[in-house]
């Protein structure tokens, strides 16, 4: 009886509570260990849901011990599901998400919202996987609408029918002399330190200036990870390494370096060329560093440092072409370095001020036979901007930038005549010699760049702007009004219009008292851009979009050569074009088509209107790629461009004093050479492990080995010519490890 009563009471007593344990962990990307912020994590069967923080961490309130299931189903990553056993002595869970192959290589170009009505910002991830990029994101600039193809081994970027010298290159807004190493094979800033790049063409706003063509700005990477990371690569043309590491409690440091052996590769490729005997070939290298640290809750500090050097040396056993003075040793060296400290104050949720400066040196050393040119320049630039959101309708942005240079220059060079791109033999020109010290130049710029919406829900956004520039060396004050607007006609269709007046100072050689004309002033161009952007995600699928638009440029006061005054502001010109781009992602495939139709002309008091040297009527780029199983990807790019223009001399006159012939030109750029066509192929393979990734790529330029004509080379008396061929098939085989 007692036992029966005891059993009855035991059955009525409450069961002992199961132990409860909190569940916490971190979500990272498999292969790189980068944290994945702001993704949902679900715990079953308790059905709890939480979101990771900026470091990828998550935490659930205590749940009963036993088995549970963690689920992460984040866009862009493969679904993660794991059964875990909860116990009081549990350890933090580590979730590794593997990127989805269908999104790892998307080619999305994003507009910058309120920042600029026409600016395009392209991420490193997007750009570096494109065919022909050679794992260098900046080389993807070649694929954008409106970017002309540059001929031969040049490393310049030509925008919408302008001249190469009309493009300005910057890092975090501070000017640098070049953006690419020799031949455009690699950018000067380490890809591992690059966050994105901004491409500004016709109609760009007033926070940039001093460029008739446009601006290409590299944005340094913002360091966010508090873990030690690194990478190293080696390929056919160069190799390098980079690291990223915490420094102290709040500091972060990233550094990278590269060195090339492209010269030895090209020497082998060009072996047998009758005009050149390459005994010492081109080399280049670069260093980069980023240091970041918050100085206070409202003040952040960042230091960016970059150094770059290119060298090209060779010996010509025989005279080049028709010029006996071009014999012997040739060398060209160009380099620069910059230190760029940057401060960012956050005054409130609505106001922010940025202040930065750059200090560095540029140097150029050129020896051509008996001629030489040596330049050493101390450069300092300053940028300051305040951006304040007044209310939902108005944001004010205003600032200034200043560039100061102090140069030492010495040279012994001939006065070159090169009308129509045909250079007279150097030995036929007058030789000028100078040794100048302390030549200074200062350029000032002030801008007002607000953003205005008539109402919070307005479809219109206006970008009025005003730019005031003063070019100190030539005492030239220029005022440039600008206006841009975006109209959201529908949720997926936006109309864009932008334009204004833009100025550019003369080159130092053009305004020099020793080699040019101190009376020249800056040049100007009126720019206009009209376009439509269409998001086709609903019609075709994710990542599908199209753009079509018109650009116009009307140049005035262009600086042209003059027989008596060397340089004068008497040139004019125009460039008109129609740009189109389309991209889509279909399952594992992605496609990208870009087509530009343009016409660029020039004229001056001595000549009627003629096609400009950099006119390219048709420019078509087609890109296709497919993601295969086991992290394989194959992509290809085809480019077709109207052939380059050449000035074919009518005849030649003998110069008995110098034993050369002088070309007699008729109409400038009177012959169009054969069209340029090239097919490129890229193959990628990735092995993804828990804490590191190994990548292999084969990037082949001109896979069909087409013999594209880049120009003409003439006989000594200009009676015969033969084509100068471009790149042969050029494979880049690379291997890269990341941890």
Image (tube, grey):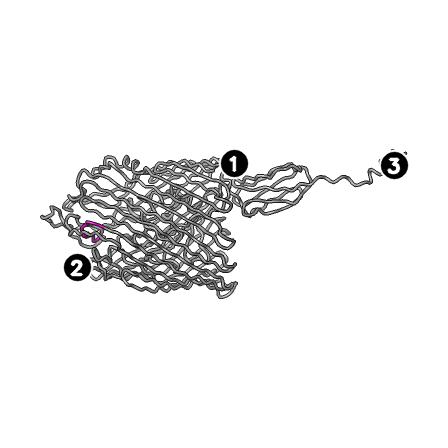
Residue at 48 percent of width and 54 percent of height: 299
Mark 3 nearby-residue class (10 Å; few <14, some 14–19, many ≥20):
few
Q: Which mark is residue 608?
A: none
Q: Name the element at disc 1.
A: loop
380 left or right, relative to 626: left
**Residue 547 place in picture, x, y as percent:** 42, 54
Q: Name the residue under label 3.
A: 5
> Taking the image as drawn, is residue 453 in sight?
yes
21 left or right, relative to 571: right
Label located before the other in sequence (2 or 3): 3
Q: In which quarter of the image is the N terminus?
A: top right
Q: What stretch is highlighted in magenta?
A: 410-420
In the image, residue 285 lies in the stretch drawn in magenta = no
**Residue 682 place in picture, x, y as percent:** 39, 39
Estimate the spatial distance between the alpha carbons at disc 2 and disc 3, rounded to whole Å. 124 Å
Q: Which residue lies furthest to the left in this view?
A: 656
**Residue 564 place in picture, x, y as percent:** 17, 59
Tags 3 and 1 touching, CB below 8 Å = no
Estimate the spatial distance between the alpha carbons at disc 3 and disc 1, rounded to whole Å. 60 Å
Q: Name the residue under label 2.
A: 564
């Amino acid at each position: 009886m007692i036992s029966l009563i005891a059993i009855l009471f035991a059955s009525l007593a409450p069961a002992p509570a199961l132990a409860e344990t909190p569940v916490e962990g971190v979500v990272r990307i498999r292969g790189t260990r980068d944290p994945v912020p702001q993704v949902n994590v679900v715990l079953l069967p308790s059905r709890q849901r939480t979101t990771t923080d900026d470091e990828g961490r998550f935490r659930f309130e205590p749940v009963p011990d036993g088995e549970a299931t963690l689920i992460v189903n984040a866009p862009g990553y493969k679904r993660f599901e794991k059964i875990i056993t909860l116990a009081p002595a549990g350890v933090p869970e580590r979730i590794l998400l593997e990127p989805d192959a269908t999104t790892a290589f998307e080619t999305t170009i994003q507009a910058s919202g309120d920042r600029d009505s026409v600016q395009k910002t392209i991420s490193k991830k997007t750009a570096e996987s494109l065919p022909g990029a050679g794992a260098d994101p900046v080389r993807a600039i070649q694929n954008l609408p409106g970017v002309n193809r540059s001929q031969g081994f040049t490393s310049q970027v030509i925008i919408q029918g302008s001249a190469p010298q009309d493009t300005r290159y910057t890092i975090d807004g501070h000017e640098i002399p070049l953006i690419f190493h020799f031949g455009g094979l690699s950018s000067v800033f380490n890809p591992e330190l690059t966050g994105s790049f901004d491409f500004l063409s016709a109609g760009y706003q007033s926070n940039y200036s001093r460029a008739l063509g446009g601006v290409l700005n590299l944005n340094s990477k913002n360091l966010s990870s508090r873990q030690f990371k690194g990478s190293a690569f080696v390929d056919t043309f160069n190799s390098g390494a980079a690291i990223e590491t915490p420094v102290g409690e709040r500091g972060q440091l990233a550094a990278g370096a590269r060195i090339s052996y492209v010269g030895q590769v090209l020497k082998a490729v060009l072996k047998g060329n009758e005009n050149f005997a390459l005994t010492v070939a081109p080399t280049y290298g670069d260093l980069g560093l980023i240091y970041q640290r918050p100085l206070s809750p409202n003040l952040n500090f960042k230091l960016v440092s970059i150094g770059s050097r290119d060298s090209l040396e060779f010996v010509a056993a025989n005279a080049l072409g028709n010029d006996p003075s071009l014999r012997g040793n040739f060398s060209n060296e160009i380099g620069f370095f910059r230190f760029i400290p940057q401060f960012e104050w956050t005054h409130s949720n609505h106001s922010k001020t940025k202040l930065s400066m750059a200090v560095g040196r540029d140097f150029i050393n050129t020896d051509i036979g008996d001629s030489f040119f040596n330049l050493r320049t101390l450069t300092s630039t300053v940028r300051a901007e305040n951006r304040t959101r007044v209310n939902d309708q108005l944001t004010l942005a205003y600032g200034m930038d200043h560039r100061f240079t102090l140069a030492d220059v010495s040279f012994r060079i001939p006065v070159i005549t090169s009308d129509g791109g045909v250079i007279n033999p150097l030995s036929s020109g007058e030789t000028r010699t100078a040794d100048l010290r302390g030549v200074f130049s200062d350029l000032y710029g002030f801008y007002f760049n607000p953003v205005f919406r008539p109402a919070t829900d307005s479809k219109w956004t206006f970008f009025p702007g005003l730019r005031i520039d003063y070019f100190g060396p030539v005492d030239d004050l220029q005022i440039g009004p600008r206006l841009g607007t975006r109209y959201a006609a529908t949720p997926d269709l936006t109309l864009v219009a932008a334009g204004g007046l833009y100025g550019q100072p003369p080159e130092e050689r053009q305004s020099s008292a020793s080699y040019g004309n101190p009376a020249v002033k800056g040049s100007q161009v009126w720019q206009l851009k009209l376009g439509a952007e269409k998001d086709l995600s609903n019609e075709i699928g994710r990542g599908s979009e199209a753009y079509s638009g018109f650009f116009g440029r009307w140049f005035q006061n262009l600086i042209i050569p003059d027989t008596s005054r060397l340089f004068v502001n008497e040139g004019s010109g125009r460039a008109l074009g129609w740009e189109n781009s389309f991209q889509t992602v279909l399952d594992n495939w992605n496609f990208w088509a870009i087509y530009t139709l343009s016409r660029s002309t020039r004229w001056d008091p001595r000549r009627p209107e003629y096609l400009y040297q950099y006119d390219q009527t048709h420019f078509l780029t087609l890109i296709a790629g497919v993601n295969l199983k086991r992290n394989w990807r194959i992509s290809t790019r085809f480019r077709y461009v109207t052939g380059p223009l050449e000035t074919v001399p009518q005849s030649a006159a003998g110069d008995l004093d110098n034993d050369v012939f002088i070309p007699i030109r008729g109409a400038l750029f009177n012959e169009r050479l054969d069209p340029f066509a090239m097919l490129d192929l890229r193959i990628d393979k990735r092995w993804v492990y828990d804490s590191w990734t190994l990548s292999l790529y084969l990037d082949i330029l001109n896979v069909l080995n087409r013999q594209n004509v880049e120009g003409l080379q003439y006989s000594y008396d200009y009676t015969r010519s033969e084509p100068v061929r471009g790149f042969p098939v050029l494979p880049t085989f690379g291997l890269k490890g990341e941890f």
